[in-house]
């Protein structure tokens, strides 16, 4: 109706083509094209010819139903990213991540995320693998009805997890075990970034700085190995490992449940043999340099286990 009114004014020479196009919010060329279609076909010529045609890449209704049914039946609590990995790798799906997410949102299974606010600037990653590792633990209900600590040792440069161990409660021995697995499989590394847990550091007053000269058993072992220890003073400072634990808490319990695992020893075997290789392949990032700063451990006169132990 707006077009017909403006077309009438332009026909009576009250408006130029340029002015008429501006009032309709289109370019002059589009307005002239509309005029030709209106003169040949009337109002029907103004309708978008694509409205009654299906897109050439539109998915069949059966395929949409199949994807929604798959999610609802087997993966109802999975995140979109986790479900998409299963859809692509296990069920050989061919659609894009955005397409899958949109279908789940339309079906009401996934809510649209709120717009994010201004983000903190992330600390630059170390350019070489082995320059700095993170070690942290997370207590969570990894299997139904049981809460364990998961002690993770990962590389700052590319997010690769070298060691992940389920224990009843984190402490000196679990931290030793994580470091030992890294040194045996990768080599000695330069520094280790941790929270201010009492097995890592001595702190005389809550919230105060750590005592760099009053070493714990773990601190003594790191000093003996020549590994620098770095203390984090806030959760934001450990953002890289915190984000990794969010991803693990979202994926790992569901994978353990699908595999029918309930015992800690079995979960540790599954973690080392099946979960970590596929998880690292999915979430590792590319490093700036191909070389690494790991130094092979030469187990000649000093046994590694004689250092990574409680000495008294």
Image (cartoon, rainbow, N blue to C red):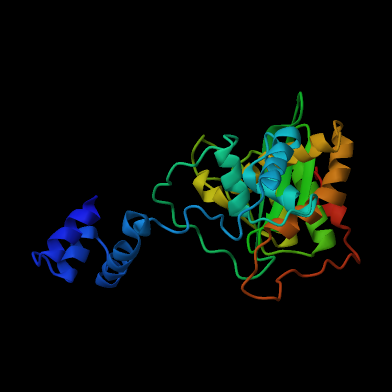
| Residue 75 in the figure: left or right of residue 107 | right
Residue nearer the viewer, 117 or 142: 117
Residue drawn at point x = 77 percent, y = 70 percent: 295
- Quadrant location of residue 25? bottom left
The percent position of residue 2, horizontal first and vertical second, equals: 22, 52
Quadrant containing the C terminus in the rendered view? top right
Residue 173 seen in render: no
- Number of marks present in the image shown: 0
Judged from this view, the residue extending furthest toward the top is 145
Where 12 falls versus 73 (above or below)?
below
- Quadrant location of residue 266? top right
Residue drawn at point x = 59 percent, y = 37 percent: 107
Residue drawn at point x = 49 percent, y = 57 percent: 122
Judged from this view, the residue extending furthest toward the right is 300
Residue nearer the viewer, 244 or 207: 244
The percent position of residue 132, horizontal first and vertical second, equals: 64, 61
Residue nearer the viewer, 10 or 232: 10
| Residue 300 in the figure: left or right of residue 296 | right
The percent position of residue 14, horizontal first and vertical second, equals: 8, 64
Residue nearer the viewer, 169 or 53: 53
Residue drawn at point x = 60 percent, y = 35 percent: 109
Judged from this view, the residue extending furthest toward the left is 14
Where 231 falls versus 249 (above or below)?
below
| Residue 154 in the figure: left or right of residue 29 | right
The percent position of residue 49, horizontal first and vertical second, equals: 45, 59
Where 41 falls versus 270 (above or below)?
below
Residue 266 seen in render: yes
């Amino acid at each position: 109706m707006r077009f017909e009114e403006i077309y009438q004014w332009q026909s009576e020479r009250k408006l130029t083509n340029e002015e008429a196009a501006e009032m309709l919010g289109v370019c002059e060329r589009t307005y002239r094209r509309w005029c030709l279609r209106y003169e040949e076909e009337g109002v029907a010529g103004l309708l978008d010819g694509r409205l009654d045609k299906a897109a050439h890449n539109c998915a069949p209704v059966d395929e949409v139903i199949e994807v929604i049914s798959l999610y609802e039946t087997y993966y109802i609590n999975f995140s979109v990213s986790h479900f998409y990995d299963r859809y692509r790798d296990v069920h050989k799906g061919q659609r894009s991540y955005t397409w899958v997410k949109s279908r789940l949102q339309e079906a009401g299974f996934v809510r649209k995320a709120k717009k994010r606010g201004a983000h903190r600037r992330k600390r630059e990653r170390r350019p070489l693998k082995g320059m700095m590792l993170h070690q942290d633990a997370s207590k969570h209900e990894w299997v139904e009805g049981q809460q364990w600590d998961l002690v993770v040792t990962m590389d700052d440069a590319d997010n690769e997890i070298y060691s992940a161990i389920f224990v009843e409660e984190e402490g000196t021995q679990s931290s030793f075990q994580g470091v030992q697995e890294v040194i045996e499989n990768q080599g000695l590394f330069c520094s280790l970034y941790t929270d201010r847990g009492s097995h890592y550091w001595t702190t005389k007053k809550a919230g105060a700085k750590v005592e760099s000269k009053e070493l714990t058993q773990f601190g003594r072992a790191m000093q003996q190995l020549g590994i620098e220890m770095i203390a984090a003073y806030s959760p934001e400072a450990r953002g890289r490992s915190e984000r990794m634990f969010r991803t693990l808490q979202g994926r790992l319990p569901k994978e353990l449940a699908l595999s029918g695992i309930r015992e800690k020893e079995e979960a540790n075997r599954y973690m080392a043999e099946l979960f970590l290789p596929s998880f690292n392949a999915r979430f590792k990032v590319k490093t700036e340099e191909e070389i690494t700063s790991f130094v092979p451990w030469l187990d000649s006169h000093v046994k590694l286990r004689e250092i990574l132990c409680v000495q008294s």
